[in-house]
Amino acid sequence: GTTTLGALAGCAGQLPGTDDGGGREVSPRPTVTAEPDTSVSLTAASGTIRPTPDTSTTNWMYEGQFPGPELRVQEGDVLSVELTNDLQEETTIHWHGVPVPNPVDGVPNVTQDPIASGNTFTYTFRAEPAGTYFYHSHVGLQLDRGLLGPLIVEEREPHVEYDREYVVVVDDYLPGEPKLPSDGGRGGGMGGRGGMMGDVRPPYEGLLINGRLPENPQTFDVTEGERVRFRFVNASSATVFGVRIAGHEMTVTHTDGRPVEPVDADSFVFGAGERYDVVVEATNPGRWFVQADALDGNEPPARAAVEYESTGGSGTPQTPSSSSNRLQYGDLRALSSLDGVSDDPDRTFDLTLSRGRGEYVWTIDGQTYPDADPLNIRPGEHVRIRMTNQSPVVHPMHLHGHFFQVGNAVKDTVIVPGHRGQVTIDFHADNPGRWLFHCHNLYHLDAGMARVVRYV
Ligand code: C2O
Ligand code: CU
């Protein structure tokens, strides 16, 4: 094959390009210099939120909003976001799920220098492919302080019809400063589920939908007969949610923004960083809860309400009944499978996910990021990663810069179940750079559960 050299900004240096065997050139995605179709300014700063009308607390936010402002563009548009850091510490933004050029991926000390307090940084990239994404700080535990927001890239031609849509950002809520247990955080140590499971999920003070506690649910207005699309984002730091809509079956249409053959379910489960789009037919008037239960916690569920009435409606919305048709990963079939991935990978990694002994660390093959070896790959390769989870808790594993095939689905984040759960992902090395691969439980990430996938 041919070889090209492309320069990447920042720490990545010079990267080789190559022919991928199928005649396609794989070289670093160039920095986007086209005029932006959409330009946005975001300021990260501390502020006050009111998760209920009579409670308030300090949060870190974009534009004083929690969740941060919805960014919505058309597929293929050039989006430019100027981030101003008005926090007292360094920050970055990561565009979770979007295969952006490496220099704008927002990983501190890997793709860029962190943005100092008082400074600005501009992220410009082409928003594609269409899908439901989100953006968040990639520094420390800042995501758990509120630095997150939805990013919607609209299809030019959706494969399912719908009349209106709502974005549903599900989160766990912890006022004050999040800390690792090793730094005196509330999650670890003695007592409670956390201690028993060897995990750190903090005792969240509430679960949120679109920034609101369950006693103050948002209402999604619909009209009878409509088809309503919901874009669910699990923007939490440490919570696996089971999601249901009372009185309605859901048709799942996308996972992590990638279209799937529509499949019916009455609930789905998602870990931190995953997204699902569903379409619901409004054929059962009333008031109904949209409900997200923490599967690994015992807080009251996060709630919003769907309302469409012939009955005058002022009562409490109905709670969903227990699930009998929960979506499984095996039910998901991508509308189009990934190019460059076959039965026979060019390179395979076998990785063990586990908890360190003694101190509070989470490891991949016994190593703790950032003191961990990169996973070296070459442009154009079909790469397979087989993960075995030796810990009792789930790990939602996320790969930056690429989609991967898992079973018949195409995703960017996948839950690896506890107690020797095994998951295999396959991807095409088509986006040279240095990309983080990590657990999206923020506490596990911060305690070392990450590796850099490095093109050599
Ligand atoms: Cu939302 Cu490194 O991830
Ligand atoms: Cu984890």
Image (cartoon, rainbow, N blue to C red):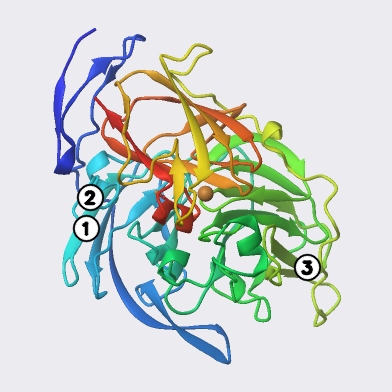
- Which of 341 and 287 lies nearest the eye of the viewer? 341
Residue 98 visible in the snapshot: no
Label 1 CB sits under 8 Å from any ligand 1 atom? no
Check disc 3 and give the amino acid type.
Trp
Q: Which mark is residue 114?
A: 1
> Dot 3 surroundings within 10 Å: few (below 14), some, or many (20 or more)?
many
Circles 1, 3 touching at the beta carbon (< 8 Å): no
Helix or strand or loop: what does disc 3 sit on?
A: strand
**Residue 16 rendering spot, x and y as whole percentages:** 19, 22
**Residue 41 rendering spot, x and y as whole percentages:** 27, 66
Check disc 2 and give the amino acid type.
Asn
Check disc 1 and give the amino acid type.
Pro
The structure residue drawn at horizontal position 62% and vertical position 26%, both measured from the top left corner, is 408
Residue 252 visible in the snapshot: yes
- Which of 1 and 140 lies nearest the eye of the viewer? 140
In the figure, residue 176 lies in which quadrant?
bottom left
> Dot 1 surroundings within 10 Å: few (below 14), some, or many (20 or more)?
many
Q: Which mark is residue 109?
A: 2
Helix or strand or loop: what does disc 1 sit on?
A: loop
The structure residue drawn at horizontal position 16% and vertical position 67%, both measured from the top left corner, is 119
Q: Where does label 3 land, which residue?
A: 288
Query: CA gap, disc 1 to disc 2?
Result: 7 Å
**Residue 323 rendering spot, x and y as whole percentages:** 82, 52
